[in-house]
Image (cartoon, rainbow, N blue to C red):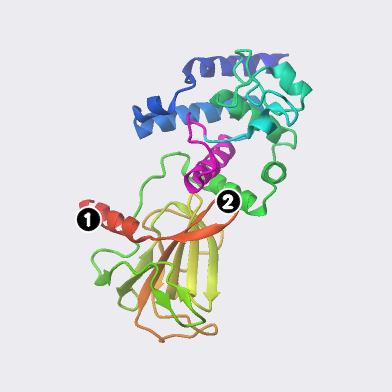
Amino acid sequence: MKLYIKWIICLIPLLFILPPNFSAETLKDLSSEEIYQERMSLYKKAEATSQIPWYYYAAIDSYERGLRIARKDLPEEEGFIAIHFKPERWAGEINPDPDDTNSISISLFEGVGLDGNGDGKANRKDDEDVLYTMSQHLSKFGNTREDIEIAIWDHYQRDKAVELIMGHAKIYEHFNTLDLRDRSFPVPLRYNYSYRSTWGDGRGWGGRRIHEGTDIFADYGTPVKSTTYGIVELKGWNKYGGWRVGIRDTNNVYHYYAHLSSFEKEIEKGKIVEPGTIIGYVGSSGYGKPGTQGKFPPHLHYGMYRDNGVIEWSFDPYPSLRNWEKRDRKK
């Protein structure tokens, strides 16, 4: 009983700081810092009621926010939380009212929607209801890392979703903040380098294909930096890219650094990095078996790939590179 009373006391302050359900128009009037603060309040409430750490909710939320950016079949985000439940799942597949908010009828039709703020409605457009519904799903499986992995797979039925979300969670836990907006140009500005837009250009080695990135020409041994906060997803040899590193950020974007001459010694799969972390050095590796070098001038091939929950595709990194270069010069 004493433990129960302590939990109630802890929850009371949260009830007063949590935001109402804002519209998309209202969100536009808030600063990024205010939005992060409100989201964290929601995650912390979910943590308090489920004893599942806040960074798992942040990871699931950012994964789904990335999906909304990548796909046109998902509705625009209206509140602070991007987690999306399809109407038939929320209200029940045979429920005649797909927008049902009555907890009793939703339960009768075997929907998953729950009332998370005690207003008598289970509204899939209400941030607190959505997070509470997700927290109850996770709690069914337990609160260990392994339990949460199983719960995420059960919800998304996709191994890649589990990998990305658990990676996001490690990043949020490590930096202990939601504000991971900073970026960096991949080559130190004091070194000699040049680049132009090369995305989509034709390539012949290994068969006809397009160039999925931007080439930044620089001298051998020029340091290569992480452009983002993220986690090292891949490291090793690729016959096209040579010695390469792949880093995944919390927007589900995969950052690809290829043709390296060598890796920074501390860079390994699972390593958490931030903008400016040295990951390797410019070279001319690739276009052959492991160790092949010198088939082209030294340069960094930088690519960006976005995951949409089903597949992953490349997009032109040149505009981002130009923006990050300008920001680094201002710093």
Residue 72 in sight here: yes
* Left or right for 228, reference 324: right
Using the image, determine if residue 249 lies above or below residue 278.
above
Identify residue type, mark 2: Leu
Q: CA distance from mark 2 to mark 1?
A: 32 Å
Q: Position of residue 172 (x, y in %)?
A: 51, 43
Q: Residue 32's image quarter?
A: top left
* Left or right for 46, reference 284: right
Q: How many dots with numbers?
A: 2
Q: Earlier in the sequence, mark 2 or mark 1?
A: 2
Identify residue type, mark 1: Arg
Q: Residue at x 23, y 66 (%)?
A: 190
Q: Residue 197's image quarter?
A: bottom left
Q: Residue at x 25, y 69 (%)?
A: 191
Under tag 1, what secondary structure? Answer: helix
Residue at the outermost front position: 96
Q: Which residue is mark 1?
A: 329
**Mark 2 crowdedness (10 Å alpha carbons): few <14, some 14-19, many ≥20:** many
Q: Is residue 60 magenta?
A: yes
Between residue 243 and residue 112, name the one nearer to us.
112
By secondary structure, the bulk of the magenta-drawn segment is best described as: helix
Q: Residue at x 58, y 56 (%)?
A: 311
The magenta-colored residue range is 54-81
Q: Which residue is mark 2?
A: 164
Between residue 64 and residue 142, name the one nearer to us.
64
